[in-house]
């Protein structure tokens, strides 16, 4: 029976059982498609990274002896649409059975279901063999529970998969080292420069331009730094273990104007495209830790494992539990427009300036920049979560909807009404001042709430609490914030609100 096997751009799993045996009657298909480049405006580095990784994957499976067809974005015969590509292949190769791996995005899942319902040949869907959990495992775990606490899910994952466990107790008798992992970075230890593959990507950029794809952001065409093959992904993992792991936990939440990546792994693209599996990342990191326990502490390793075994799997489970209605949620009814400086980086707020420009230059910002600087600003200015989602989905190298949306719309914008976060991640400038060196070099004064030089985060924070106090009045975790709001002098609050309104009306001037 002649089979066609579809490989989507984020299904580059060379270890998948599909590739462990050769079969002359199986044809694989990979396609660069306008339907995937155009559903949102993407950062140029994101498009380059996906296309290059797909091309490398095609070469790799051919080298293993598999038959594979590839549609480049500029190929004249490329129909640029998944349904048509499958139809062309079925016709051309006289395909009798169509097989695919379950997509991680709802959009593609629906599209493939529709395509399959119209096909008159045999069909079969396979697991991607990537995640620890199945699509609906989180829903089953929280069945009947009101609160979907990540911590409970994470502890269960540790036990179930025997990760950092000593029998039934957590290694070091502690599940969580979060309290140790909140240091500000003051240059105490040097940050090794990021692993860079110096790939020349000018040819692929020309093809993207020739195809007429509209992208944004910057790229150094001679020094593309992201891993685009399994081998390079393994090198990034090795680099992380050898150079960065020993300080990962300590500076996990820190920000510094001179250090874009600090001790973060930069592994998200390699994992989200499935060039690396979360299991091999965790196992490699833990093995490295055990071989180097005199140099590396458990808190660094636990901090890292929590992100992947905990957050990453949890976020995926929430996506499949809550879609498709999740994509429309906007409980705070936020409806403002994203300011233009998100596309240009031109703002006087030093923290935003650094975080946005870094995102435009590198297609990367780390977790706290995404959550407590950029996301904090968009929530305080009450931007419509659709706009926020579209920006995050376009700008980051690792942004695929299943992981981007629950993080952005849920954790960061509280648009899901607290499914993920028990209270909104909002803060005044004082948090940014505590965790970074941004404020000392800023045009604004982090100590002021209103007035010409007041830090916009301060003004916007009190205004946000005042505007949303009715919504949050029953939320116990908001009690302290709302009490402090009540204690503000009414005249002061009035001035804050006038100023906040002026900022929201004219964000690009700040
Ligand atoms: P490290 O800090 O080294 O962490 C290691 C790994 O842990 C990451 O590679 C990632 O796979 C995983 N991880 C950590 N936090 C999370 C999380 N909250 N959710 C899922 N996985 C996590 N991550 C994405 O992969 N794609 C996104 O589109 C994305 N959007 C985000 C949007 C917002 C508003 C926020 C707050 C976070 C978002 N994250 C997203 C999570 C996190 O910011 C990135 O995974 C991380 O910055 C990637 O860099 P790194 O590989 O250096 O991570
Ligand atoms: Fe950001 Fe305010 Fe600090 Fe400036 S003073 S860097 S705007 S938090």
Image (tube, grey):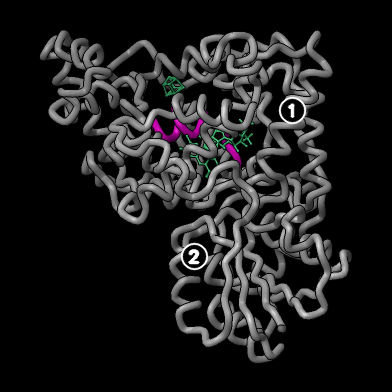
Q: Is residue 43 above or below residue 435?
A: below
State the quadrant of the C terminus: top left
Considering the whole magenta stretch, tell me its main secondary structure: helix
Q: Is residue 290 above or below residue 74?
A: above
Judged from the image, the secondary structure of the residue bearing numbered disc 2 is: helix
The crowd level at tag 2 (other Cα within 10 Å; few <14, some 14-19, many 20+) is some
In this view, the residue in front, 481 or 124, is 124
Q: Can residue 464 be seen here? A: yes
Marker disc for residue 108: 2
Q: How many marks?
A: 2
* Residues at circles 2 and 1 in contact by the CB criterion of under 8 Å: no
At a point 44% along the width and 59% down the height, the residue shown is 106
At a point 54% along the width and 48% down the height, the residue shown is 399
- Residue receiving disc 1: 285
Residue 49: percent from left, percent from top: 69, 54
Residue 226: percent from left, percent from top: 73, 46
Marker disc for residue 58: none
User: On the image, which quarter does residue 12 sit in?
Assistant: bottom right
- Cα gap from disc 2 to disc 1, whole angstroms: 32 Å
Which circle's residue, 2 or 1, is located before the other in the chain? 2
In this view, the residue in front, 145 or 386, is 145
Q: Is residue 340 left or right of residue 81?
A: left
In this view, the residue in front, 96 or 62, is 96
Q: Is residue 221 above or below residue 318?
A: below
Stretch of the chain drawn in magenta: 364-378
User: On the image, which quarter does residue 304 sit in?
Assistant: top right
User: On the image, which quarter does residue 66 sit in?
Assistant: bottom right
At a point 64% along the width and 19% down the height, the residue shown is 165
Q: Is residue 191 above or below residue 360?
A: above
Q: Magenta stretch containing residue 365, yes or no?
A: yes
Q: Magenta stretch containing residue 351, yes or no?
A: no
């Amino acid at each position: 029976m002649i089979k066609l096997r579809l490989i989507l751009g984020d299904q580059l799993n060379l270890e998948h059982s599909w590739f462990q045996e050769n079969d002359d009657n199986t044809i694989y298909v990979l396609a660069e498609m306008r339907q995937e480049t155009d559903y949102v405006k993407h950062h140029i580095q994101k498009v380059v990274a996906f296309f290059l990784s797909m091309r490398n994957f095609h070469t790799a499976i051919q080298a293993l002896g598999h038959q594979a067809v590839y549609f480049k974005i500029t190929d004249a015969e490329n129909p640029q649409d998944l349904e048509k590509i499958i139809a062309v292949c079925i016709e051309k190769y006289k395909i009798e059975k169509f097989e695919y791996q379950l997509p991680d995005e709802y959009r593609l899942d629906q599209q493939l279901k529709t395509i399959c319902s119209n096909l008159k040949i045999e069909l079969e869907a396979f697991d991607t063999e990537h995640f620890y959990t199945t699509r609906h495992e989180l829903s089953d775990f929280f069945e009947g529970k009101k609160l979907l606490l990540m911590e409970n899910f994470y502890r269960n994952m540790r036990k179930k998969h025997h990760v950092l466990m000593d029998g039934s107790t957590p290694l070091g008798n502690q599940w969580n080292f979060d309290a140790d992992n909140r240091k500000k970075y003051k240059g105490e230890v040097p940050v090794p420069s990021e692993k860079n593959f110096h790939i020349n990507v000018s040819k692929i950029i020309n093809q993207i331009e020739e195809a007429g794809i509209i992208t944004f952001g910057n790229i150094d065409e001679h020094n593309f730094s992201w891993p685009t093959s399994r081998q390079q992904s393994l090198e990034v993992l090795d680099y992380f273990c050898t150079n960065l792991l020993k300080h990962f936990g300590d500076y996990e939440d820190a920000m510094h104007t001179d250090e874009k990546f600090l001790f973060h792994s930069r592994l998200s693209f390699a994992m989200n495209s499935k060039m690396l599996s979360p299991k091999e990342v965790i196992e490699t990191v833990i093995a490295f830790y055990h071989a180097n326990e005199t140099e590396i502490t458990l808190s660094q390793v636990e901090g890292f494992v929590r992100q992947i075994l905990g957050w990453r799997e949890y976020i995926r489970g929430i996506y499949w539990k809550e879609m498709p209605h999740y994509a429309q949620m906007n409980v705070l009814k936020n409806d403002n427009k994203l300011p233009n400086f998100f596309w240009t980086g031109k703002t006087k707020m030093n923290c935003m300036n650094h975080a946005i420009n870094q995102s435009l230059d590198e297609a990367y910002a780390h977790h706290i920049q995404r959550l407590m600087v950029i996301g904090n600003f968009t929530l305080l200015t009450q931007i419509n979560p659709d706009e926020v989602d579209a920006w995050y989905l376009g700008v980051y190298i690792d942004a695929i909807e299943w992981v981007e949306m629950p993080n952005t719309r849920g954790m960061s914008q509280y648009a899901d009404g607290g499914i993920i976060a028990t209270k909104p991640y909002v803060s005044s400038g004082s948090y940014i001042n505590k965790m970074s060196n941004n404020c000392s070099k800023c045009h604004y004064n982090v100590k002021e709430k209103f007035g010409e030089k007041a830090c916009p985060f301060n003004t916007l924070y009190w205004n946000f609490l005042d505007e949303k106090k009715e919504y949050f009045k029953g939320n116990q975790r908001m009690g302290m914030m709302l009490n402090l709001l009540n204690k503000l002098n009414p005249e002061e609050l009035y001035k804050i609100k006038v100023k906040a309104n002026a900022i929201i009306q004219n964000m690009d001037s700040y």
